[in-house]
Amino acid sequence: MSQSNKTAYLSKSLYMRGLQCHKSLYLDRHRPELRGEATPELEVLWARGHEVGVYAHMLFRGGVGSLFW
């Protein structure tokens, strides 16, 4: 898929990555093959983040959901 056909999105995680390190965000978007394998610790963090999102939707039922997490 060409770069012009890709849909650009910026999740909270990607935004935070960019704030912490511009180069990391660039490489994540443009050179994903350089990314390492997910560790079990990262899997746990992602699961916790998903849980937080579920609870947030329960607290703010009228809010808009995001399909990117």
Image (cartoon, rainbow, N blue to C red):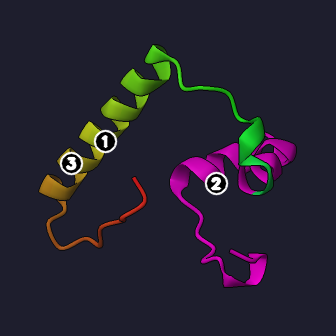
Quarter residue 17 falls in? top right
Q: Quadrant of the N terminus?
A: bottom right
Neighbour tally class for label 3: few under 14, some 14-19, many 20 plus, Cα within 10 Å: few
* Residue under the point 81% across and 53% down: 26
Mark 2 = which residue? 15
| Among numbered discs 2 and 1, the one appearing first in the sequence | 2
Element marked by disc 3? helix
Q: Which amino acid type is shown beneath numbered disc 2?
A: Tyr
Residue range in magenta is 1-29
Residue 46 within the segment the image draws in magenta: no
Task: Give the main secondary structure, helix, strand or loop, of the magenta stretch.
Answer: helix
Element marked by disc 1? helix
Q: Nearer the viewer, residue 11 or 30?
A: 30
Q: Nearer the viewer, residue 67 or 32?
A: 32
Q: Nearer the viewer, residue 56 or 26?
A: 26
Q: Is residue 7 left or right of residue 19?
A: left
Element marked by disc 2? helix
Mark 1 = which residue? 50
66 is higher (above) or lower (below) than 24: below
Q: Which amino acid type is shown beneath numbered disc 1?
A: His
Q: Which mark is residue 54?
A: 3
Neighbour tally class for label 1: few under 14, some 14-19, many 20 plus, Cα within 10 Å: few
Q: Which amino acid type is shown beneath numbered disc 3?
A: Val
